[in-house]
Amino acid sequence: MQVDDLQAMQIAINLADRARLISRPNPWVGAVVIAKTGEIFEGSTGRPGLPHAEVMAITSAGALARNATIYTTLEPCCHTGRTGPCSEAIIEAGIERVVIGITDPDKKVSGRGVARLREAGLKVDLGVRADQIADQLAAYIHHRKTNRPFVVLKMAATLDGKTAAPDGTSMWITGESARRRVQQLRAQSDAVLVGAKTVLADDPRLTVRDVHGESPRRVVLGEVAPSAKVNPCLQWRGPLTGLLDHLGSQDVLQLLVEGGPTVAASFHREKLVDRYVFHLAPALSGGGDALPIFSGRGIATMKDLWRGKIVSTSQLGDDIEVVLAPKTSNPEKRR
């Protein structure tokens, strides 16, 4: 089968998707070797300590890697960690051309992998499907640039913007498909956070169920009883910025915030949210006394209205998922 650069890189992107649940805190990378014969060999990053995507694809190709083209979503590493440098493996395999989606923002790589490949005489092309790959690796890129986790805030609400009834009950606003999506978000995250009030009201476990993936670390803002199902958890009482610095130092690439209106408002007002995920149900509370998405004081005038950009919308059963991002593209501005 003949494939062009865009098609080959799309295969690599699909492979990287499969790696996300096992490769962290390493980046989830996909790689494809296309031999001169046209045969395609695939690889994706394994668990920490196992071979990276490029090595997996080269190993699969064997002798057919010589004079072949390799496609990789992220710049090959050029340093020795738990595994050897992928750039050297590519050179030693006799690869002729390397097509890379994006450069690696990690300070240990950051262009050095590309430089090493070119120094060895290989043809290197950059930027194929770069925007798509940057979005796929958003949490990894953010962590490497800021040393903090990528913060995803998830809230379920009625169409008139309410998250719970006046008596505090909130289960269930959305349907089964939306709840399954939340489980997927947990599996993709390294930590999940709620407030102590949520623990007291619902006593959640915050574990992953009904989907493939490991349960994230659990964080509670405030203190909880030893008998709470969320244990063992990190109980935090300091500033949110300090929490993000702490989690970032612990290799937490993505933090999923599932708290109520008070917790959601705290992250929003401090401009610490990198993605908003709203699950909107075809339901109405019908009044102003139900709990809103954000509690407390809002804007004073329309000129202060917070505006972002819609990343995606999708149907989840009877519900709608709207993913929203801040307009700023520079995470350093939110430090």
Image: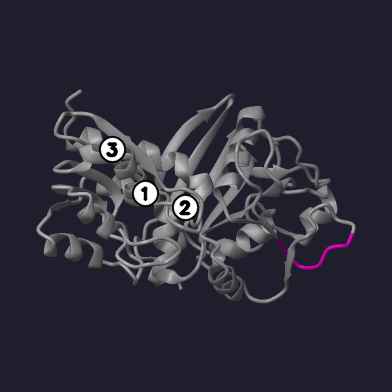
Q: Quadrant of the N terminus?
A: top left
Q: Residue furthest front?
A: 63
Dot 3 or dot 2, earlier in sequence:
2
**Label ID, residue 135:** 1
Residue labelled with disc 2:
50
Residue type at numbered disc 3: Ala
- Foreground label between 2 and 1: 2
Q: Is residue 96 above or below residue 121?
A: above
Residue 48 percent coordinates (x, y): 50, 56
**Label ID, residue 61:** 3
Residue type at numbered disc 2: Leu
Residue 231 percent coordinates (x, y): 80, 58
Give the magenta range.
Answer: 219-226
In the image, 91: left or right of 242? Answer: left
Residue 143 located within the stretch drawn in magenta: no
**Displayed quadrant of residue 165:** top right
| Mark 1: secondary structure | helix
Q: Nearer the viewer, residue 160 or 206?
A: 206
